[in-house]
Image (cartoon, rainbow, N blue to C red):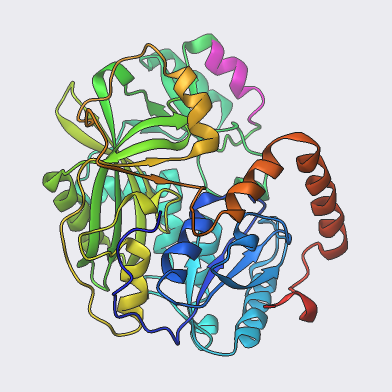
Amino acid sequence: MARRGTRLAVDRTVPGLILKIGAYPLHHGGVGAIRSLGRLGVPMYAVTEDRFTPAAVSRYLSGRFVWPTTGREEPERLVAGLLRIGRRIGRPTVLIPTDEEAAVLVAEHAEALAGAFLFPQVPPGLPRRLASKQGLHALCAEHGVPSPAAAFPASYADVEAFARRARFPVVAKNREAFVRRTRPAVAGTTRIGGPGQLLDLARDWGPRPGVILQEYLPREQAEDWIVHACFAPGGAPLALFTGVKVRSWPPHAGMTACAFVVDNPGLAQRTARFAARIGFAGIADLDWRFDRRDGQYKLLDFNPRMGAQFRLFENAAGVDVLRALHLDLTGRAVPGGAQPAGHRFVVENVDLPALFAYRGGRRTPHTPVRATGTELAWFAGDDPLPFLAMLARSVGPGARHLRELRRAGRRARTEAPPRQGEGPK
């Protein structure tokens, strides 16, 4: 169901473009972004892997640009393709990255893109530092923001030395966000129980392990908090929301499957101070973990782009972080208002298995006993086709057929900018 915001004074002459790099067609965040601005009458465009992605079939999409990418393309080639899309749209367009690669590309090539697109101005190297586990850890240390203790081994000998002194379990993560350009050391967040397991894994990491070995914050003594925000240049918050993650998929280490809006003014202030100190502007998605052992909120991730679950949050005036960005970039005032505490967000296709995985576990602190309302990631009565496309790609013969079509399209268009016939219909 559509939520509030239909009376926001948005500039409907300025479109939005969902920019993604790499193949992840089942991305509910992109669908949410198309709906969020599309429901206000803003023309919405999207870069898609093919014509059958959920985002590509939304009723609120004015046009799609079929452009399969891998994340391994040269930046100059991506910029050229993006400028070609800008010429097809034909007017300045708000650029909305949905992954770190896209956010970094925009920041590092802002001068080339500025004529065709609207986006926040940030220090060119900042999004890359924030997307890097090592870069974020260094920024936290520089600005006095707590984060989990971490080591960055440069060799197998460093891993051996760490194994002798570390307190297990520990967590291994890929050091850089752009692992699609190389072979990732680990598939995702990996819990390591002891020195033997660590050394066995490290034998496959090569001479220069691209990992971060991080302090493990036990679930039974920690709480997972999320902050979604949009900052003006200089770090002043235009919209700032806090919530609690209840379930994720894969369990305890993956994307949000279910979360609730929960007020946390102290955490909001911490986030705003950090953003101002580093000079961040635009949309951000942050993961914090409250460690009850020492009473500290520790920053795990600072994603310099829209988070997939951003539609959990909308203030009393109908402003979410994307609407705040569009209003600000088009010179409009951003109305304030309280966030609806107790509101729930559910990602249908991953929360069902997550429910079984979390069955019988401890209840997440601060979780409301009953939701005041629910936002579904995929299903919407006014825009049902993305939900059906998600189902078709997820199960059954339809999914295999669509995968075959997608592979054929990739073979035909690998690393090619969108063709003339693949623009807005």
Q: Main secondary structure of the magenta part?
A: helix
Depicted 373 relative to depicted 36: above or below? above
Q: Is residue 352 left or right of residue 400?
A: left
Q: Nearer the viewer, residue 340 or 14?
A: 340
The residue at the point 23 percent across, 59 percent down is 315
Q: Which image quarter: residue 393?
A: top right
Q: Is residue 99 visible?
A: no
Counting from the top left corner in percent of width and height, residue 375 is at: 38, 47
In-image side of 21 versus 312 (left or right) = right
User: Residue 171 lies in what quarter of the image?
Assistant: top left
Picture residue at 15% right of the left edge, 56% below the top: 338
Write down the region rendered in magenta: 197-205
Vertical comparison of 134 with 411: above or below: above
Q: Is residue 410 left or right of 235 when viewed as pictured?
A: right
Q: Is residue 173 magenta?
A: no
Residue at 32 percent of width and 77 percent of height: 327
Between 146 and 331, the one nearer to me in the picture: 331
Q: Quadrant of the C terminus?
A: bottom right
Q: Which of these two is toward me, 417 or 80?
A: 417
The residue sitting at the left extreme is 266
Q: Position of residue 55 (x, y in %)?
A: 60, 59
Question: Compared with residue 83, is residue 306 higher up or lower down, i.e. above or below?
Answer: above
Q: At 22% from the left edge and 52% from the top edge, which residue is drawn? A: 271
Image-quadrant location for residue 10: bottom left
Q: Is residue 166 visible?
A: yes
